[in-house]
Image (cartoon, rainbow, N blue to C red):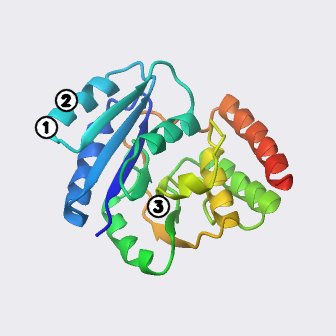
Amino acid sequence: MSSISAVIPAYNEALIIASTVQAVDDTLARLTDDYEIIVVNDGSQDATPSIVEALGQERPAVRLVSHAVNQGYGATLATGFATATRDYIFLTDGDRQFDVRELAGFLPLLDRVDMVVGYRRPRADPWVRRFYGWGWNQLVNTLFGYTARDVDCAFKLFPRRLLDDVQLHSTGHTLSPELLIKARRAGYRIAEVRVTHLPRTLGQAKGARIDHIVRSLLELVKLRFEVAGS
């Protein structure tokens, strides 16, 4: 069984992060003997880091990495990816909107593909977030060719060696599609699997803010020029 580094970005998720980390730890303990859980605290102003530190005392696989100030979703993922030490990286968000037990269905697919990515059907978010998500998917797949059914789905399993083959530059929400776009261009075989998406029960969603959307669009334009010039 391959070793796995779980990377969980977290920003002001004090109400739900313990439950998320516990679920990931329990799942990985059943799937592999060699794993770590890296929670990247992106400058949270609540008790997120202290909660994760306490969990690390109880669960040796759990590690906390912190940004002193908020740097953005993509920068948070990049920190987690750079910190990972195992063969595969499993990405999931800190808000527990996924059933992490479904990771078990991803592992057998690694016999025939290089990475496995989830897609949310149906997506259990308010209509505004679903609308933005639909538009974002359409835009990415139009600009770069088919990338994925759900480019932003935070339920991905990929080999850590991918990060040696591609360079990621986005610091906002564009990092997830950038990872997929560059993986496909590098010849990585990708399987897509439907995953359960659950309503957020605690905490507050952050991705639909106008400043985040503008930042993502600007990064996407830069990525388009980068890809076109390569």
Mark 2 to mark 1: distance in Å? 7 Å
Q: Do residues under tags 2 and 1 come within 8 Å of each other at their CB atoms?
A: yes
Residue 159 rendering spot, x and y as whole percentages:
47, 61
Which residue lies most toward the bottom here?
Answer: 112
Mark 1 to mark 3: distance in Å? 28 Å
Please give the label number shown on residue 159.
3
In this picture, residue 6 sits left or right of residue 159: left
Position above or below: 78 against 131: above
Residue at 30 percent across and 63 percent down: it is 101
Which residue lies most toward the left here?
Answer: 58
Which element type, helix, strand or loop, lies under badge 1?
helix
Position above or below: 93 against 47: below
Question: Which amino acid type corresponds to the residue marked 2 in the rendered image?
Answer: Ala
Mark 3 to mark 2: distance in Å? 29 Å
Residue matched to label 1: 58
Residue 14 rendering spot, x and y as whole percentages:
33, 29
Please give the label number shown on residue 5.
none
Q: Do residues under tags 3 and 2 come within 8 Å of each other at their CB atoms?
A: no
Question: Which amino acid type corresponds to the residue marked 3 in the rendered image?
Answer: Pro
Residue matched to label 2: 54
Which numbered disc flags the more N-terminal residue, 1 or 3? 1
Q: Do residues under tags 1 and 3 come within 8 Å of each other at their CB atoms?
A: no
Q: Quadrant of residue 29?
A: bottom left
Camera-side residue: 9 or 123?
9
Which numbered disc flags the more N-terminal residue, 3 or 2? 2
Position above or below: 64 against 120: above
Q: Quadrant of residue 73?
A: top right
Which element type, helix, strand or loop, lies under badge 3?
strand
Q: Sort mark 1 into few (<14), some (14-19) or many (20+) by Cα contacts within 10 Å.
A: few
* Camera sees residue 93: yes
